[in-house]
Image (cartoon, helix red, strand yellow):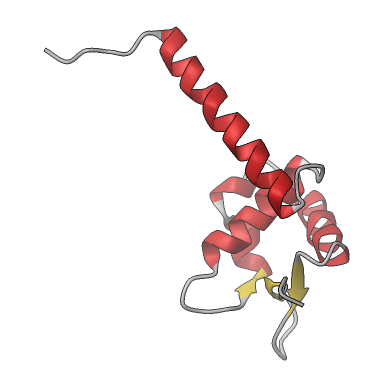
Amino acid sequence: METIPDMSSLLKNIAKMQIMLADMEAELGIKNIGTIEKSVLSSVVDLTGDTRLVSTKEILKHPLNCDYSRPSLFRALKNLEGLGKIAKGGDKRGLYALADQSA
């Protein structure tokens, strides 16, 4: 018979994960950016596999971004670019990469 964890232990685990996430966001300097910007940045990171560049089309279709309007996502891309978290890349329009944070 499978045991189901009680609600309080699940909530306690969620709280611990949120605290850990907030600490990591602070370390990366993204704690105070908006929710949409965090989702877009996370989707760029997720989509950047073997390839360095990610298309706007892929970012817009990513599951983390499905609840946001198209204009909001484009604003988030622009904001992240302004913050130096992502950069336009390649010769074609609509390609983004994670910005080089080592410089």
Judge whether residue 69 can be spotted in this image: no
Q: Is residue 16 above or below residue 54?
A: above
Q: Residue at x 76, y 54 (%)?
A: 73
Quadrant position of residue 90: bottom right
Q: Is residue 89 above or below residue 21?
A: below
Depth check: 41 or 8 in front?
8
Q: Position of residue 59 (x, y in %)?
A: 63, 61
Please tell me how many numbered marks the rendered image carries: 0
Quarter of the image with the N terminus is top left
Q: Residue furthest left?
A: 1
Q: Is residue 53 above or below residue 46?
A: below
Q: Is residue 49 above or below residue 26?
A: below
Q: Position of residue 70 (x, y in %)?
A: 76, 53
Q: Residue at x 58, y 62 (%)?
A: 45
Q: Residue at x 58, y 36 (%)?
A: 20
Q: Position of residue 69 (x, y in %)?
A: 75, 46
Quadrant position of residue 74: bottom right
Q: Is residue 51 left or right of residue 33?
A: left
Q: Position of residue 17 (x, y in %)?
A: 53, 31
Quarter of the image with the C terminus is bottom right
